[in-house]
Amino acid sequence: SSKELLRTDNQKSSAFGSRRAHATTLGALLLS
């Protein structure tokens, strides 16, 4: 079950990473 926990944690961090990248892209578009 620790594998299960690790998998959901990876999904959370990857979702967070893509959200942050999206926000960064939007910010760059607004600043340019």
Image (tube, rainbow, N blue to C red):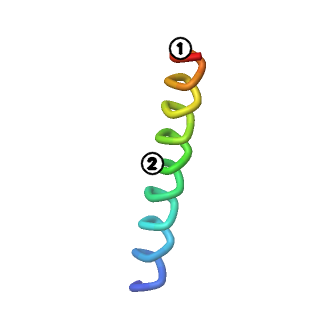
Mark 2 residue type? Phe
Quadrant containing the N terminus is: bottom left
Quadrant containing the C terminus is: top right
Task: Relative to 16, say whether 25 is above or below.
Answer: above
Q: Which mark is residue 18?
A: none
> Which residue shows up at 44% across the image and 76% down it?
6
Sequence-wise first label, 1 or 2: 2
**How many discs appear?**
2
Are dots 1 and 2 in contact, CB under 8 Å? no
Measure the C-alpha gap from mark 1 to mark 2. Answer: 21 Å
User: Quick one: SS at disc 1?
Assistant: helix
Please tell me whether mark 1 or mark 2 is closer to you in this view. 1
Disc 2 crowd rating (10 Å Cα; few below 14, some 14-19, many 20+) is: few
What residue sits right under mark 2 in the picture?
Answer: 16
> Which residue shows up at 49% across the image and 24% down it?
27
Task: Relative to 17, say whether 20 is above or below.
Answer: above
Please provide percent x and percent y for residue 17: 50, 50
Task: Relative to 30, say whether 10 is above or below.
Answer: below
> Which residue shows up at 49% across the image and 67% down it?
10
In this rendered view, identify the residue nearer to me: 28 or 1: 28
Q: Which mark is residue 30?
A: 1
In this rendered view, identify the residue nearer to me: 2 or 29: 29
User: Quick one: SS at disc 2?
Assistant: helix
Please provide percent x and percent y for residue 5: 40, 75
Mark 1 residue type? Leu
Disc 1 crowd rating (10 Å Cα; few below 14, some 14-19, many 20+) is: few
Please provide percent x and percent y for residue 20: 47, 41
